[in-house]
Amino acid sequence: MCGITGFYGSGDAASIENMTAALWHRGPDDGHVYMDGPVALGHRRLSILDVQHGLQPMLDAATGAVLVYNGEVYNHIELRLELEKLGHRFHTSHSDTETVLRAFLQWDVDCFLRFNGMFACAIYEPRKKRLTLARDRFGEKPLFYARNGPYFAFASEIGALRLWPGFDKSFDHANVQRFFSWNYLPGSRCANRHCHGLPPGSWLRFDLETSATTLKSYWQFALRPDESLREEEELARELRRLLVQAVKRRLLSDVPLGIFLSGGLDSSAVLAAAVEAAGPECLRTFTIGFREKSFDESAKAQKVARYLGVRNDMRLLTEEKLRESLPHILSRMSEPFGDASLIPTFHLSSFAREHVKVALSGDGGDELLGGYDPLAAVAPAGFYRKVVPAWLHGLARKLVGRLPASDRNMSLQFKLARALRGLSWPASMQLPVWMSGLEPDEIRKFFDDPLNPEELFADACRLYNENASLNELQQAFMFFTCLYLPDDILVKSDRASMMVSLETRAVFLDNDLAYFCSRLPMRFKYRHGQRKYLLKKALSGWLPPEILRQPKKGFGIPLNAWLRSLPVPTGDIPGLKPGVLRHCQALHQKRHGDFRYFLWDAQAFSHLPQMAAN
């Protein structure tokens, strides 16, 4: 796991040194830069495989091509053998970095589809005068780029890009509104002008002579339900096999490795598969607990570890410790991000990093196999839309809105209020509004020059319309997998873990496992109100029955209660009308409204480095 950056033009040696140094936390083990006239590349290394070799930027002497790469390609040994048969001679013993470079030299951009792993990379070809960027299928590893006239720059984090002399530091006001609607920035959007995220499963080519860019998708997630798949026992066995195979691939490491264990189904499944793959003796798990019982799952995590005979290290986090860490964590995010579970994820990563350098996670299980609460609301929502008149819906919203806001994790009052909010809008916007910080009516009241709902939720509407043939349940799966997973869940995991130089590996996002899940008919994911139907069947016998039956809790903090005592953020949020924040916090403190997401988003935004500098 590493950090990469670079530019063409509008910079010098000091610029690339500063940009690379800004990524130190992503790779504290080593760092180097490469310069060729107006082209500069920088790399910070977190050494995981072939620790003594695989240094970057990596140069191919025959072609002059130079690679900077962040990630792990788990099938690099198989690719290396194939490339050797094609005549390639390797100079490292087992560096996946060299495999990535030689695969590109052999197959050009077609190589990216062959990689099973997580990666973001840039390859400079001086003879062809072009720079190629690429990102893994689901977007586990980040990559941003910016333009300034004929010049171009890229980096793993916007904080490094901001040090490029050609970077435009002004805010895109439309994207600021989108952030406060989504709680994160969807798609390839960024808060700064002329800055973009490279979409997952895509490559971009920049021509140094013409300054033209070509952006293409090499892979997109799609649901391909195969209705001929009927035999449950056979499918459960295959799911178990693929889980073990995915874990085996991710256990390869030259440094200490552990497993995140929350006590939930996905992390427990990863641990059970790891026990099958490697035995319990060499495994180590990490858990954090909370004193607030509605947020705490540590007892379940310890029960799973004992059941499987694995060592579990647990740390109890107090509310005081969590609150004290807020400024430190939020100020290190170089982009606006409003998912408060970033805080416990950081503490879990920090705890694990005291003992290991790599950790396996259960990210992706909810999206691919159906773990989210809103899935249970899809069918009732369709019926509700048909039979409940608008006036009665409005009355229901008012009545639920008058209930005191509960501080419990995912309380009934919170779920009802959110479901009714989503049902106030078209089906294409239902899920993002259900999860939003501010719904469109509030954006219209709170911001100058407000976007209309179709613009706020354009990414969700486009995805919905592109999949018009799917039913509402399938549409929900597409939303969570194509938007929420890459733009929220994986951003949280990457930033929280890399702040402490820890590599995380998402088992469920293995190519073969994800393809299997995409082919499953929906009845094996969600059946008669039961989420993750096939996964629970596959894990029967691997895990205690009570773990399989438990409801999903999530990885949260007592946000609602905290925000009643946190000070109102200082500084002007671009486009937000004066006095709005104070008014909303006053209502929130008196329990006359639930503005937890809006107020938290404001906290996150106010800690951005560019806000602090103003």
Image (cartoon, helix red, strand yellow):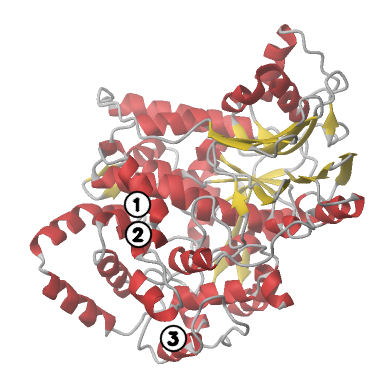
Please tell me how crowded label 2 is: few (under 14), some (14-19), or many (20+) other residues with Cα within 10 Å: some
Q: Which residue is mark 2?
A: 454
Instruction: Check disc 1 and give the amino acid type.
Output: Cys
Instruction: Check disc 3 and give the amino acid type.
Output: Cys
Name the outermost residue toward the right. 13
Q: Which residue is mark 3?
A: 584
Instruction: Check disc 2 and give the amino acid type.
Output: Glu
- Residue 76 x, y percent position in the rendering: 68, 24
Foreground of the two, 535 or 333: 333
1 or 2: tag closer to the N-terminus: 2
- Residue 431 x, y percent position in the rendering: 34, 58
Figure quadrant of the C terminus: bottom right
3 or 1: tag closer to the N-terminus: 1
Please tell me how crowded label 3 is: few (under 14), some (14-19), or many (20+) other residues with Cα within 10 Å: some
Side of 65 where 541 appears, left or right:
left
Report the Cα–Cα distance between label 3 and label 1.
Answer: 29 Å
- Residue 198 x, y percent position in the rendering: 59, 44
Task: Confirm whether residue 276 shows in the render.
Answer: no
Name the secondary structure under disc 1.
helix
Residue 52 occupies quadrant: top right
Q: Residue at x 75, y 34 (%)?
A: 209
Foreground of the two, 607 or 213: 213
Q: Which residue is mark 1?
A: 461
